[in-house]
Image: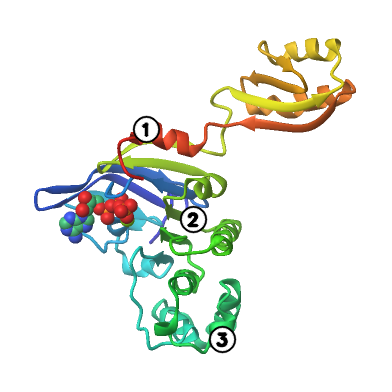
């Protein structure tokens, strides 16, 4: 039985010890259904171990987790979950369609459904031209694409992607981004481990930072209304009257040449500010809200002396 109202993932005080090594100290998180969740942290922070506990591939030393409303490891629920491991090994004598059919069948897909799904998926990940090759002939990036297709073959409700862009060229990275967005549009939940902060920044709805096996910060990237937002705009023909009018939203507007800088208490008011400027006859050629980049945040939270 699964509970439709339950978050896609809920972890309570998950802990994993390997002998005296504590890989994950205390992991508590809740990921709502339909969210793209980015899990960030330096090497060895416990990201992969956390995913493995949520999939019940690694038994927690203590703590509990429910995934899609069922206890982690529930076999029926496992069919609704996709997983791209960080280091994977497939039977490399298979061709990509054979690999996808194997994984599809393991998830209970019918041969009829697979006949449609497999070519579409190969197309999606750009492997159609290589469909007759054996996986042993694949480059790292091609293998990563095969792995991604494998994780998505059964249209899972929840997908765990552990460093999905590793080994991919810029086109491949864009592909991953597009695929993740398409997964969200389909209503799926995506749990993403990544080091590529700029990728996470444009893709994820929520992020959590893990350090030494513990979440040290989390952030909702959709809701920027929590703090002040700085704006840098390029504006010509801004009258003194229009500049003064910005006082309705901000008290720190400063114009230098054609560069206008100001901050507002919440991003919500930005459309009004822009309308005001344009309505007052100013020529606005750019209007850029400045957010603390995840990279800055990452370095601040995790510490500069540690490897990324
Ligand atoms: N099977 C294991 N036996 C012993 N220690 C382990 C094992 N798996 C992981 N660890 C240790 O647990 C810690 C967390 O490892 P984990 O693989 O979860 O990190 P990670 O955040 O995924 O790192 P990376 O960014 O390098 O992938 C590390 O110190 C690692 O050495
Ligand atoms: Mg890892």
Q: Is residue 275 visible?
A: yes
**Residue 274 vs residue 299, the one in the foreground:** 299
Question: Which quarter of the frame holds ligand 2?
Answer: bottom left
Q: Nearer the viewer, mark 1 or mark 2?
A: 1
Query: Residue 250 location, x and y as percent?
Result: 68, 14
Task: Say which label, 3 or 2, has the lower sequence index.
Answer: 3
Query: Residue 66 location, x and y as percent?
Result: 33, 53
What's the distance in space between the residues labelled 3 and 2, CA to CA?
25 Å
What's the distance in space between the residues labelled 3 and 1, CA to CA?
47 Å
Q: Residues within 10 Å of mark 2 (few under 14, many from 20)?
A: many
Query: Residue 270 location, x and y as percent?
Result: 71, 27
Residue on which the image places disc 1: 301
Q: Quarter of the image containing the N terminus?
A: bottom left
* Mark carried by residue 267: none
* Mark carried by residue 189: 2
Q: Nearer the viewer, mark 3 or mark 1?
A: 1
Q: Residue at x 52, y 89 (%)?
A: 132
In the image: residue 306, left or right of residue 261: left
* Mark carried by residue 115: 3
Q: Is residue 113 visible?
A: no
Tell me, yes or no, whether the two marked residues, 3 and 2, touch with CB atoms within 8 Å: no
Residue with the most extreme right position:
281
Residue with the most extreme front position:
257
Residue with the most extreme left position:
20
In the image: residue 133, left or right of residue 222: left
**Residue 274 vs residue 26, the one in the foreground:** 274
Q: Residue at x 64, y 20 (%)?
A: 264
Query: Residue 212 location, x and y as percent?
Result: 25, 41
- Report helix, strand or loop for mark 1: helix
Q: Residue at x 48, y 43 (%)?
A: 206
């Amino acid at each position: 039985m699964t509970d439709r109202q339950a978050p896609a993932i809920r972890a309570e005080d998950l802990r994993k010890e390997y002998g005296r090594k504590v890989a994950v100290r205390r992991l508590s998180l809740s990921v709502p259904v339909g969210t793209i969740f980015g899990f960030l942290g330096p090497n060895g922070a416990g990201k992969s171990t956390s995913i493995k506990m949520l999939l019940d591939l690694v038994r927690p030393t203590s703590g509990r987790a429910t995934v899609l409303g069922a206890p982690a490891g529930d076999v029926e629920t496992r069919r609704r979950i996709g997983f791209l491991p960080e280091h994977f090994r497939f039977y490399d004598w298979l061709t990509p369609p054979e690999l996808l059919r194997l994984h599809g069948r393991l998830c209970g897909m019918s041969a009829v459904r697979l006949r449609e799904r497999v070519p579409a998926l190969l197309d999606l990940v750009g492997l159609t031209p290589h469909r007759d090759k054996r996986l042993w002939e694949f480059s790292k990036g091609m293998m990563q694409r095969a792995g991604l297709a494998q994780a998505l073959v059964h249209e899972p409700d929840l997908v765990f992607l552990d460093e999905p862009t590793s080994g991919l060229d810029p086109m491949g990275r864009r592909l991953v981004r597009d695929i993740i967005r398409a997964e969200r549009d389909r209503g799926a939940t995506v749990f993403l481990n990544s080091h590529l902060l700029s990728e996470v920044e444009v893709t994820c709805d929520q992020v959590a930072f893990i350090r030494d096996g513990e979440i040290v910060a989390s952030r909702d990237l959709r809701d920027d209304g929590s703090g002040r937002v700085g704006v840098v705009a390029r504006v010509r023909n801004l009258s003194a009257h229009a500049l003064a009018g910005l006082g309705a939203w901000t008290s720190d507007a400063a114009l230098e040449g054609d560069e206008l800088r100001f901050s507002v208490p919440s991003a919500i008011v930005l459309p009004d500010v822009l309308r005001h400027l344009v309505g007052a006859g100013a020529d606005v050629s750019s209007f850029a809200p400045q957010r603390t980049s995840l990279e800055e945040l990452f370095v601040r939270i995790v510490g500069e002396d540690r490897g990324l």
